[in-house]
Amino acid sequence: MSKTVSALQVLVFRLEDKRYCIDIAHIDEIVDRHELTKLPDSKPHVEGVMDLRGTTTTIVNPKTVLGLSGSGTGNRVIVFETEDERSIGWVIDEVNQVISLDDVEVDESVESQSVHGVIRQDGEFIIWVKPSAINV
């Protein structure tokens, strides 16, 4: 089942050699990755914490949650707005662009706990992920 989603913009980013996107409404800012402090006994997808202008920001590696095999972590961080006052960021390999979903088909037949659907652009697939599934 495909449908066109109107008046919605998503940020396209790269993890390894795959492209992903998230609704820009969830994003607070994009920053460079700084020194991380590892947390003992944290979940496997938590890389550590980073000081972001006086706010302790938990840095998550979405590759771990999405089952990607690459061990390297990128140098950009997408910082999310959360409803519970926590500051969470995803370490990613590269920010690509913001696209509008006005004229794009979203295939929702692949929806799962962590995926809204798949967008086809320029002969490639972009996986639309749900931040709530990764920010746990």
Image (cartoon, rainbow, N blue to C red):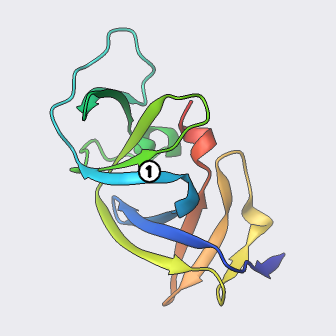
Give coordinates of residue 126: x percent, y percent. 53, 71
Q: Can residue 78 be spotted in the picture?
A: yes
Q: Considering only vertical position in the picture, is 131 above or below 86?
A: below
The quadrant of the rendering that contains the C terminus is top right
Which residue is most to the left? Answer: 35
Give coordinates of residue 15: x percent, y percent. 37, 57
Residue at horizontal 48 percent and vertical 63 percent from the top: 20
Residue at horizontal 57 percent and vertical 46 percent from the top: 131
In the picture, measured across the screen, residue 82 lies left or right of residue 70, that is right
Residue at horizontal 42 percent and vertical 24 percent from the top: 44
Give coordinates of residue 53: x percent, y percent. 24, 35
Residue at horizontal 79 percent and vertical 79 percent from the top: 2
Which residue is most to the top? Answer: 41
Residue under label 1 = 28
Give coordinates of residue 65: x percent, y percent. 50, 39
Q: Considering only vertical position in the picture, is 38 above or below 60?
A: above
Quadrant in which residue 46 is drawn: top left
Which residue is most to the right? Answer: 1
Q: Secondary structure at mark 1?
A: strand
In the picture, measured across the screen, residue 3 lies left or right of residue 85, that is right
Q: Can residue 23 be spotted in the picture?
A: no
Q: Report the front residue among 48 and 84.
A: 84
Amino acid at dot 1: Asp
In the picture, measured across the screen, residue 118 lies left or right of residue 78, that is right
Q: Report the front residue among 77 and 125.
A: 77
Residue density around tag 1, few if under 14, some if 14–19, many if 20 or more, within 10 Å:
some
The quadrant of the rendering that contains the N terminus is bottom right
**Total residue callouts:** 1
